[in-house]
Image: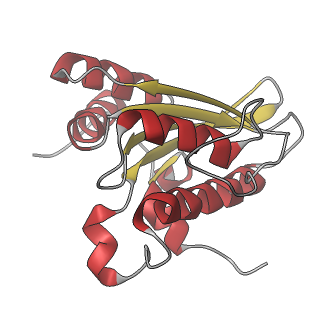
C-alpha cells in the first residue's frame, strides 16, 4: 500500500496506534514558556519510572522488552505551551486502576498519596496530566487515535510531530 496524502497518512497512523496501543489516553503538559525539549525529557523520565513501578528495577533488561509500556506520543503547541497526547498500552501485569493512579503520581504531585508510586514526580508540582481509559471497542480506540494524530503532517520531517514512546526513552540524554 502506498500512502499518497496527508489524510491517508494520519488515518494509517491512527489505525495502527488504535489497534496496538490505545488502552489509555494520557495528555500531559508543562506550564507556558517551557520548551518542547523539556517536555520530551519529562516524557522519557515518565516512561522509565512507570516501567520500573510495574516491572521492577530490571525493567530495562532485554527479556522485559515485550512487557514494557508501549505507545505513541504526539506533540502540540497551543496557548504558548507544549503538551503531548499519549496512546499507551500499560506494562504487563498492570491493573487498570493501579496504572491510572501510578501515572498520575509519576507525572506530577497529587493531593493524595499513592499506594502504588512513592517516588518523586518527574515534573514536581508544575505539570498537568489527564488520564482516561479507552473503551475496549475498535471504534472508540480509532476515535481517540484520530484525535491524537489530528495535527500530524505528511512531510519528511514528520518525526518531529510524533514518536513511539519507547524510542523516545532510547534517546535519553545524560544530565
- The picture places residue 152, in percent across and down from the top left corner, at 47, 36
The residue most toward the right is: 33
Is 64 left or right of 46, judged from the image as shown? Answer: left
Which residue is at the front of the view, 128 or 94? 94
Residue at the (66%, 42%) spot, across then down: 105
| Residue 27 lies in quadrant | top right
| Residue 145 lies in quadrant | top left
Whether residue 75 is visible, yes or no, is no
The residue most toward the front is: 115
Whether residue 121 is visible, yes or no, is yes
- The picture places residue 122, in percent across and down from the top left corner, at 73, 54
Which residue is at the front of the view, 169 or 53? 53
Q: Tell me if residue 160 comes above or below residue 9 in the rendering.
A: below
Residue at the (9%, 46%) spot, across then down: 1
In this figure, which colouring scheme has been used for the structure? secondary structure
Which residue is at the front of the view, 153 or 173? 173
- The picture places residue 49, in percent across and down from the top left corner, at 58, 61
Is 11 left or right of 100, judged from the image as shown? Answer: left
| Residue 34 lies in quadrant | top right
The C terminus lies in which quarter of the figure? bottom right
Is 73 left or right of 27, judged from the image as shown? Answer: left
Q: Tell me if residue 60 comes above or below residue 75 in the rendering.
A: below
Is 151 left or right of 143, judged from the image as shown? Answer: right
The residue most toward the left is: 1
Amino acid at each position: 500500500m502506498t500512502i499518497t496524502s496527508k489524510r491517508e497518512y494520519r488515518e494509517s497512523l491512527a489505525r495502527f496506534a488504535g489497534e496496538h496501543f490505545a488502552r489509555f489516553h494520557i495528555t500531559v503538559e508543562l506550564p507556558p514558556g517551557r520548551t518542547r525539549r523539556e517536555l520530551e525529557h519529562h516524557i522519557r523520565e515518565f516512561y522509565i519510572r512507570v516501567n520500573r513501578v510495574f516491572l521492577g528495577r530490571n525493567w530495562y533488561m532485554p527479556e522485559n522488552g515485550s512487557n514494557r509500556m508501549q505507545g505513541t506520543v504526539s506533540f502540540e503547541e497551543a496557548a504558548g505551551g507544549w503538551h503531548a497526547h499519549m496512546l499507551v498500552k500499560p506494562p504487563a501485569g498492570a491493573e487498570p486502576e493501579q496504572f491510572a493512579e501510578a501515572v498520575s503520581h509519576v507525572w506530577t504531585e497529587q493531593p493524595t498519596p499513592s499506594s502504588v508510586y512513592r517516588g518523586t514526580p518527574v515534573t514536581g508540582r508544575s505539570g498537568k496530566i489527564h488520564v482516561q481509559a479507552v473503551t475496549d471497542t475498535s471504534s472508540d480506540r480509532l476515535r481517540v487515535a484520530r484525535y491524537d494524530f489530528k495535527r500530524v503532517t505528511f512531510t519528511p520531517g514528520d518525526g518531529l510531530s510524533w514518536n513511539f514512546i519507547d524510542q523516545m526513552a532510547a534517546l535519553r540524554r545524560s544530565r
